[in-house]
Image (cartoon, rainbow, N blue to C red):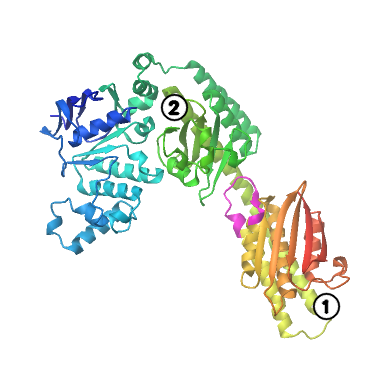
Amino acid sequence: MALIEIRQLYGGQRGTRVRGFDLTIEKPEIHVVLCTSISALDELVHIMYGTALYRSGHFQVDGKNAIGLRNKEVQYITMDTYLFPGFTVMDNIFMASHEYGFMTRKKIQRRFGYLMKETDCAIPDMRVDHLTAEQKKMVEVLRCYAERPKLLVVHELAGNLSYRNLMWANTLFTNLKNSGTTVLYLTSKWEDMLKIGDSVSVLRSGKNLGTFTKEEVLATPQKTYYLMLGGQTMASLLDSGDGGGQQDFVNTIVSGVKLLSQDSDSENVLKFFMRQVSRSLKAANSIVYVSDRNSARVRFISGLDFHGDELPLIKRDVVRQISSTEELFYTNYLDVHLGDLLENRMNISMIHTMVCIPVKFGDNYLGLLQVYFDDDYAYTQADKDYLSAIANELAFAIESFRLKGRSVLIQESHHRIKNNLQMIISLMELQKYRLFQNGEYVKAEHISDTWDTLVKQVKSIASIHDMLSREEETDSIIGVDVIIRAIRDFYAGEADIQTEIERCIIPHNRATSLALLVNELISNGVKHAAREDKRLAIRLSLKRCGESYSFIYHDNGPGFPEGFEPWKSKGIGMTIMQSIVVEEFEGGFCCGNRSGALIEITIPY
C-alpha cells in the first residue's frame, strides 16, 4: 500500500484546472509538484484541504481518505495564515497537540525552549498579531515541525520568506523527512525543485506529465523545464550529448595549466578561467569568490573588467552558505528571493538565469563559482560536468597560489623580523642619544616620557607585524586604511582622531615603516599640540593623486613656531619622518600652519 496516493482527482469547479491528477509516493521524501499555473496549484491544495469542491477521485494517506483531514497526521502550510492572533507564539505552536490541555505552563515553556534551540529560531514568545507576516509563516513551520505529521503539504512558501529563512525552513523539512514525514511541496518555481526536492512531478493541463527522481532532474534539468512549459515534444527529443563542449573543456584546462605555470599573479589565472567559462557556456559573465580560511573576508575575480558596484555580486554570507553545500545552485529572474542574494539589488536586472557551484579542495571549501546569463538557460549534464571540472581546476589553482604565497610569506616574515628588530634597536639608540646628548643629569620625567614614546613606537611595529603574520591572501599587499586605523586606536583616549582614507594598498615590506610614520605624527601631535582649554582634534586624510599618494596630517593645536624649518629640526619625530618619507619612500613633505599644524606628505605609488 502506497504511503500517499492521489488517484484521478478532478476538481468540481467550472473550468477546473485539476483534471485527472495522479500521484503515488511510496516512502517518506520531499516531493515537489511543479506547475507554472499558480491557480492550478491553489485549486489542488484547496481540494486536499477540503475548502474546494472536487468531482471525483481520491486522496489517501496510509489507505485512509485524507481530503479535508487536518490533524496530527496531515498538516498544511498554505499561502494563507492559520494562526490565533490573540495567542502567543508558544500557544499557537502547541495548542493543536492532544497533550496541550494536560501540560503545566512550565512544561510547555520548557518544550518551547527545546524547540527554539533545536530549530535555531529566535522568534520572541509574544502575541502573534504583533509579529511580521514572515515571522507568522515561520511560526506555522515551527508548529508543523513540532507535530511531526505523516504528511506535510507546503504551498508556495518562497513568496513568504526571505532567502535565509527559506533555507532555514528547508532544513527543517529535511529533518522531518528523516524522521518519517513526507513533505509535498507545491510550487510554480522551477528553481525550487533543484533546492529541496527528492522527486518532482510536473503538473500541466491538470495532469501529472511525469515523475522524476532528483538524480534524473539534475542529469537533464531541461527535460522538466520543457515539460513544465508545455514542450512535451522538445522534452522527449532532448539529447544532452555535446562533443564540442568536451573540446572546450580540454582547451580551457590545457591553457589554464600552462598559464598557471608561467604567471605568478593569481588574479590573471583566475580571470582567464572566468572568461573561458563564459565563452564555453555563452554566459554574460563568470565570477569566482575566494574565501579566507581565517576570517570573514571574501574576494572576487570577474571575467569582465568591471568595478564591484557594476556587477551582480553575491552577498558574502550567501557565498559561504552556498559554498558549504555539495550541490549545484540554480535560480532565475522569476525567483522572488534573487535580489536577497545580491550585495546590490539594483543589479538584479543583469541576471536572467544564474548557476553557482562550490569550489572545493579535498574537504576544504575554498569559494564559489558564479555564472550568470542574460537569457533563459537550463543546464545539461554535460554543462554540469564541465562546471564541476572547472571548479576542481579553480580549487587546484587557488590552493597552488596559497602554497606559493605561504612559502614567500615565511621567507618575507623572517626578513621582516630581522628588519623590525634592527629598527627597534635604532630607535632605542636614537632616544638614548637625544636623552644624554648634553651629558647632564636627566630628570625622571624625561626618562619616563622617552620610555613611553619608545613603547608606543615598538607597539606600532608589533601590531603591524602581527597583522601581516595573519594575512591569508596570496598577494603580499595590505590596505593602508587598515594600518592607519590600527595606529589610531592606540591614541583613542588622548585625542579625537578622524580619518578620511581612500582604499589604497602597499607592499608588506613598506607596512611597518608606514605604521611608524603614522605613529610619529599622532604621537608628536599629542605631545606638542594638546591644550588645556580644548580637546585635541587630529585629522588624517589619504588619497591617490595620479602616480602618488597624498597623505595629510592636520590638528587644532598651536601649530609650528614661526620660521620653523623641518630640515634643521633635531627632534626625533622629524628625523624619523625624513628617514622614512625621503630616504625610504623617495617622497617629500612640507610643514605649515592652518588653524593648527599641517603636514603634507607625498609618496610615489
Judged left or right of residue 565, residue 514 is left
Q: CA distance from mark 2 to mark 1?
A: 75 Å
Q: Quickly name the residue at label 1.
A: 437
Give residue 288's position: percent from left, percent from top.
Answer: 54, 37
Quadrant of the drawing holding the N terminus: top left
Residue at the (19%, 24%) spot, across then down: 10
| Residue 117 visible to an observer of this rendering | no
Q: Quadrant of residue 66?
A: top left
- Is 314 displayed left or right of 161 in the figure? right
User: Where in the figure is residue 33, as x and y percent of width and height?
Assistant: 28, 30
Q: Quadrant of residue 214?
A: top left
Q: Which residue is at a point 57% across and 27% down the rendered structure image?
A: 276
- The residue located at (18%, 26%) in the rendering is 12
The location of residue 149, given as percent across then percent down, is 19, 43
Helix, strand or loop under label 1: loop
* As drawn, 460 above or below 14: below
**Badge 2 is on which residue?**
384
| Residue 418 image label | none
Q: Which residues are magenta?
A: 466-481
